[in-house]
Image: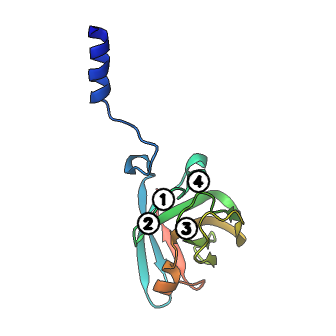
Amino acid sequence: MRAWMTAVALAMALPVASCGDSDAARPATIPVTIKAPDKTHVFTVEVARTPEEQEKGLMFRTSLPEKGGMLFPFAKPRYASFWMKNTLIPLDMVFIRTDGSIDRIAENTIPENLEPVVSGGEVSAVLELAGGTAAKLGIDENATVTWNDK
């Protein structure tokens, strides 16, 4: 009986891991700057560095902060293809070339759609923002994107 009570007491003292949308399970954040011809915008975004983080991305999220998002950097430039499986909110996907120029912006992607959303060429990263952000802020393919992930 004493061993059982000790086990219960220890279990109650330990933090409980959740499978949900907890901040503890989220990747670290960095600032990302988008310089449009007429204005500069700074976002605080999570960075999906590992294959597991990149696979999960923003799945199961029900919202994003107005100036939040997620950056998917690649080890070397490649054609990028994303889908919206288990992604519950519309996203703007900004496909970024090695020099920081924007290859393509896929605006307001459809939640839970299995059709691939692809870059137009080889890119070194993809930035996902809340759907409608690019149009709202006047961000287009003339902008440049920079970040320091060191």
Q: Earlier in the sequence, mark 4 or mark 2?
A: 4
Report if the CB atoms under discs 2 and 1 are less than 8 Å apart: yes
| Residue 49: assigned label | none
Query: Is residue 103 at all visible to an observer of this figure?
Result: no
Distance of label 2 from label 3 (alpha carbons) = 13 Å
Residue at the far front in the pictured view: 1
Residue type at mark 3: give it.
Answer: Leu
Q: Is residue 60 above or below residue 16?
A: below
Judging depth in this view, the residue of 74 and 43 nearest the camera is 43
Q: Which residue is mark 2?
A: 64
Q: Earlier in the sequence, mark 2 or mark 3?
A: 2
Q: CA distance from mark 4 to mark 2?
A: 17 Å
Of 133 and 149, the residue lying toward us = 133
Could you say which disc has been placed on residue 61 in the image?
A: 1
Between circles 4 and 2, the one closer to the viewer is 2
**Callout 3 crowding tier (Cα within 10 Å): few <14, some 14–19, many ≥20:** many
Residue for badge 4:
54
